[in-house]
Amino acid sequence: MLNSIASLTSSTAAVDAVLGAVPVPGQYFSFTKIVFSLLAFGILARAMTWTDTDLARLHGRRTFWNAIVFLTGLLAVIVLLFVPNFLVALLLFVAVSSAGLGSYILQRNSLVAETDRVFTAAHLKKVLIGSGAKPAEKPLPLLELQIAIQQTNGAHVTAPDDELLQTGFQLAHFLLADALSQRATDVALIPSGQTTRLLHRIDGVTTERQRLSVQDSSALVSFIKYASKMDVAEKRVPQRGRLVVNSKGGLTPLWVSTSGSSAGERLDIKLLSKAQELTLDDLRLPADQLNKIRGLAGEPKGLVVVTGGRDCGTTTTLYAFLRSHDAYVQHIHSIETRPLTELENITQHKPKVSEGQIDTAGTLRSVLRGDPGVVLVELAKDAPTLKMMLQAAQSRKLYAGMSSSNTFAALSELMTLAGDPQLLSRSLKGIVAQKLMRKLCPTCREAYQPDSQLLGRLNLPVDKIKQFYRPPSKPLVDEKGKPIICFTCKGSGYFGRVGVFEILVVSDEVRELIKQDAGISQIKSVCRKKRMLYLQEQALRRVIEGLTSVNEVVRISKT
């Protein structure tokens, strides 16, 4: 009996031990873990919604960044559900979900104005304290674009020991990174009273970026001069130097120049792009014009003139002409005061200086003694140089740059400088005039129906033109009233430039008129009968294509 009782007691204890391991009702779930998980999911969902709204407002890469944020969020949820240790899972959830969202925030902050950046110290202060506080003076923006300043031999410029130059070292990196991100081709620091104006030239239009203090400007100029091997102490005599910026986009050569004035020292920086590496096919010419350009380049001998004003891309076009020749078969030479870039297997000369004057004719004479096959002269603006080129063009190919506004103005100048109509008629093959127009931003351009009176003034058929394009006609705002900033053009309405060309091919009829020393109006009349289009008419073709706006045509017509 006692044994039976003992056995029963032992069995009961074993059952109690097993049942004791099972959670009692109410202990299957942790209320704290549920609250934290739901809170994490809510924050993640809110972040995804904000990302999509922000991308729509800023015209960003919506599909790409939404996918990045969603996938990292999904991975974070999987981590939270399947990692056994809840504290570790929660920390991993925060880290993984922040990776995608943080990447987007870094990228969007590098593209928008400083006042529109989020999760910065200024933004968090504004959110926590309110917007009533007095705004601080804006410093130069620190962008995500990492750069390194180098000398032309590839040596990196490090921070010097001098305190002033150390400040300039930091400011120079901020300034050049900002210029690259804004696609500026020229940067200028111009003293103006108690401040210094910082100007950017973007797509051929100069705008004021901001103003710097005299102290910051002085430190910046001093460092740039130090890095460019200039005399830092010399503040009045003009100086020139060169640098290279190494960024994510590759190497960007810089031309640096300083000049003194009563207001202070001015700094100019020109950022050389890869546009100088274009070929004729890269100029984006209409098919009919491209055929004419190829025909001029294919002529085995004769003179081709490329003309245009300052910053019109004439050097780029001249380089494109040179690249149409085989530099390994022909001896190609160029004469340039300041070459924009090194041309592969092409001998580049700087014109001689005689008695303080540039002697282009003397340099050309020396080059021709070597019997070159192709010669480019950057600027033919004097009679001796032009006459020598016309003589040489009877047996070889020559290209010349000029600064006239159109082909007929260039032809008139050529006839005056040559002084010999017969020589000019034998040697001249064609004249190309060009200007650069800003292209409309493909992301935010706006279609509209042009007024019939406008079409009439432009001599365009009213019944065939359905729509033109232009930058946004009014500031766009989101549901909160904040202005939209286009990621592509950063609010300018334009992105990049394209050349517009007027091409005068010297036909037999035109050649005979030049030989007879006929007037320009008579030559114009013959060219119009051959359906030659003037520069403005070629520009309107780009408007009809949707590539640029009517206002841009008006702007370049005034320059």
Image (cartoon, grey):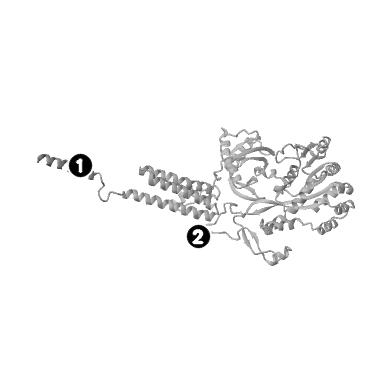
Q: Secondary structure at mark 2?
A: loop
State the mark number for residue 14. 1
Q: Residue furthest left?
A: 1
Residue 354 x/y as whole percent: 80, 36
Q: Of 265 and 167, which appears nearest the observer?
A: 167
**Which of the 4 quarters of the picture holds residue 340?**
top right
**Which of the 4 quarters of the picture holds residue 353?**
top right
State the mark number for residue 392. none
Residue 551 x/y as whole percent: 67, 58
Q: Give how far apart the Cα atoms at labels 2 and 1 are.
A: 68 Å
Any part of residue 214 in sight: no
Which label lies toward us, 2 or 1? 1
Q: Of 121 and 350, which appears nearest the observer?
A: 350
Position of the N terminus by quadrant: top left
Q: Of 417 and 353, which appears nearest the observer?
A: 417
Query: Would you call the spot at circle 1 few (<14 residues within 10 Å), some (14-19), or many (20 or more)?
Result: few
Residue 404 x/y as whole percent: 78, 50
Q: Secondary structure at mark 1?
A: helix
Q: Of 312 and 130, which appears nearest the observer?
A: 312
Q: Earlier in the sequence, mark 2 or mark 1?
A: 1
Residue 382 x/y as whole percent: 82, 44
Q: Amino acid at mark 2?
A: Glu
Position of the C terminus by quadrant: bottom right
Any part of residue 497 in sight: yes
Total residue callouts: 2
**Residue occupying the point 72% across, 62% down:** 458
Residue annotated with mark 2? 479
382 with respect to 155 (left or right): right
Badge 2 vs badge 1, beta-carbon distance below 8 Å:
no
Q: Amino acid at mark 1?
A: Ala
Is residue 355 positioned above or below 200 on the image? Answer: above
108 with respect to 28 (left or right): right
